[in-house]
Each structure stands twice: as C-alpha cells, then as structure tokens.
Amino acid sequence: MGAAAAYLHIRPVPQLPGFAARVDGLDFSAPLSAEVKAELHRALNQFGLLTIEPHTLTPAQHIDLASAFGDIAPGAFFPRLPGHDEVEVIRSDREHPPELNVWHSDVTWRRDFPTGTVIQLIELPESGGNTAWACGRKAFQALSEGMKTYLRGLHATHSWTGSLVEDALRASGEEAMVNAVRRFQPVSHPLVRRHPETGDEVLFANEAFTRRIDGVPMRESRAMLEFLREWMVQPEFVYSHRWRAGALAVWDNRSTQHHAAADYWPQTRLLHRVTFRSQAESAA
Ligand SMILES: [Fe+2]
C-alpha cells in the first residue's frame, strides 16, 4: 500500500512516520457509506492504529464501525453491554483497580484471535489513563538481517494462563476456570507473521501471553523473548494517546500491541470494546 494512496472520504493524519493516524472528517450523523468503510479499512492496513476524536455513538453505530474492518469477533471474558453481546464493557474503578498495564495484543491465546479492536472511551479519569501502541512492523524492520533470518520461521506458544485473564477467571469461580482450561489450550503462532492484507512482515510476541519460542532450548527462548519484549516497545515504535471522553481508537491487533497506563486509580475509567476478525485473515 503506497503511502501516497489518495483518500477521498476521510483524512488520515499520521502521528508518527507510517504509524498511528488520527482520522478526521468522519460523519456519524448518517450511516457510514461503503466508500467510507473501505477507506477506513485501507487506512487501518496502512497505519496500524486509527484514532478518532469524540463522537456520540449508539452501541449499534460502534458495532457498525467495527464491521468496516471484518466480521464481529467473540471477544474475551469481559461483561457485555445489556442488549448488545458484541460490546464488552471494561471498567476500572476504586473496587476494580486497572490491570491492563502490561503490553499485549488482544486474546492471542486463541487460535482465531481478533484481528482488530474498536474501543470508545466512555468515562475518563481527570488525567492519566493513556493508551500506548507499539508497531510490530517497524520493530521487525529495524532488526539486523541476521536476526530477521533467525526469527523467520520460528513459532511461539501463547496462553492465557499466568496472565491477567487468569486472574479475571479465578474471580469468576472454579467452573469458569475449568471450562477455560478445557476450551483454550495453548496455541502456537508464527513469531514473524506476514500480514495477509499488506504483505508486511510483523513481529508477533507480547509480554502478557507469549510463553515460549517453540523448538529451541528453554534458556534461549527465555532470553530471546526478553530481548523482543524490550526491543518491541522502544520509543521509536510507540505512540501514546491521551484520551478525550467519547474518543475512539481502532487498531490492527496483528501488527500492534498496546498498554493501558494504570496511573489513575482510584478514579474511574470505562470503555466499550468491539473486536473483529478480518475476512482476509480467516481465508489465509
Ligand atoms: Fe487490550
């Protein structure tokens, strides 16, 4: 996808070179047209992360926006918005301290993990609560050729066990835990994924869910994952977003990871999340 490709209906404004665009020019007063949705999808592939300034959206509009990028995905274990099973409600407050302050891509412990996510910030702390995203494409490109060659072709095991997801399941009771153990066995993903829509090579490992590199000695795996953890979140690859209430973000979960700062407790931060799975990914 050439950086010069024209957009006729939306205005993506990159916040970093080739990564993280604020999308101006969206009008939610009428249903999004097929042309607008196609340009949003193209912009997401090009920039990996789209932010959208505050809008008042109904849950149905939030779901419709997500449908621009793929089929609506099942999400994870968060509570749902009454009447809208597609919308997960993620609330942190005095009784529920924030715990998403670990770098992760969403739900990579599923084989058919969501290829992207649309969130809207509903309630914000007075300050803090930023979300940062790191670009796995830039992180891969910056490696030496020798390291790229080493990493290509390796796979890594991802699991929810030992993560914040396990903590949440434990709180839901033994049955939820046992069901999850049965349903969601560890899965293996390529460590360098080729993005099915752009052809870009992308580093795909995250601190929260990537447990080990398959088929190499354990100490090698441990040291390499620690190197990648540190490498992938260098400032050159990271955009940190300061939210306004009602603002939205859409990210490509295959080519980015994110971190929600937990600096605002005991204030409240509330967001709605809809995940999606791209048709290109399902066909790949
Ligand atoms: Fe997340």
Image: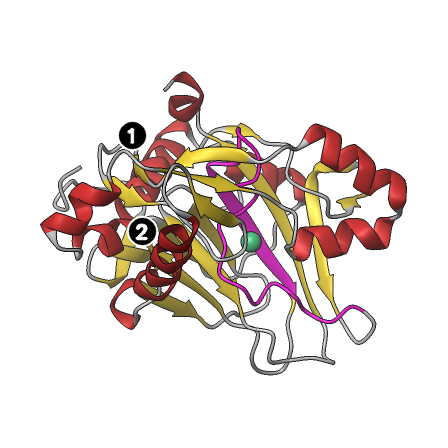
Q: Amino acid at mark 2?
A: Gly
Q: Amino acid at mark 1?
A: Glu
**Nearest to viewer (mark 1 / mark 2):** 2
Residue 136: give its label: 2
Q: Return the disc, 1 or 2, that comes first in the chain's sequence.
A: 2
Q: Is residue 283 visible?
A: yes
Residue 125 x, y percent position in the rendering: 64, 77
For label 2, the crowd category at 10 Å Cα-Cα, with few meaning under 14, some 14 to 19 and many 20 or more, is: many
Q: On the rendered structure, is 16 left or right of 3?
A: right
Residue 98 on the magenta span: yes
Disc 2 under 8 Å from ligand 1? The reply is no
Q: Can see residue 24? A: no
User: Which residues are the magenta region?
Assistant: 96-122
Front position in the image: 260 or 166: 166
Left or right: 117 in relation to 50 = right
Quarter containing the C terminus: top left
Q: Position of residue 133 (x, y in %)?
A: 41, 60
Which residue occupies the foreground of this view, 211 or 189?
211
Quadrant in which ligand 1 is drawn: bottom right
Query: Label for residue 197?
Result: 1
Mark 1–mark 2 distance (CA, rounded to whole Å):
15 Å
Q: Residue at x 38, y 46 (%)?
A: 217
Where 204 falls versus 14 (above or below)? above
Q: Residue at x 27, y 56 (%)?
A: 19
Q: Is residue 190 above or below residue 210?
A: above
Residue 120, position as x, y percentages in the image: 58, 55
Q: Residue at x 73, y 71 (%)?
A: 97
The image shows residue 24 at horizontal and vertical percentages of 36, 55
The number of numbered discs placed on residues in the rendered structure image is 2
Q: Quadrant of residue 164?
A: bottom right
Is the distance from the Cβ of mark 1 to the nearest ligand 1 atom less than 8 Å? no
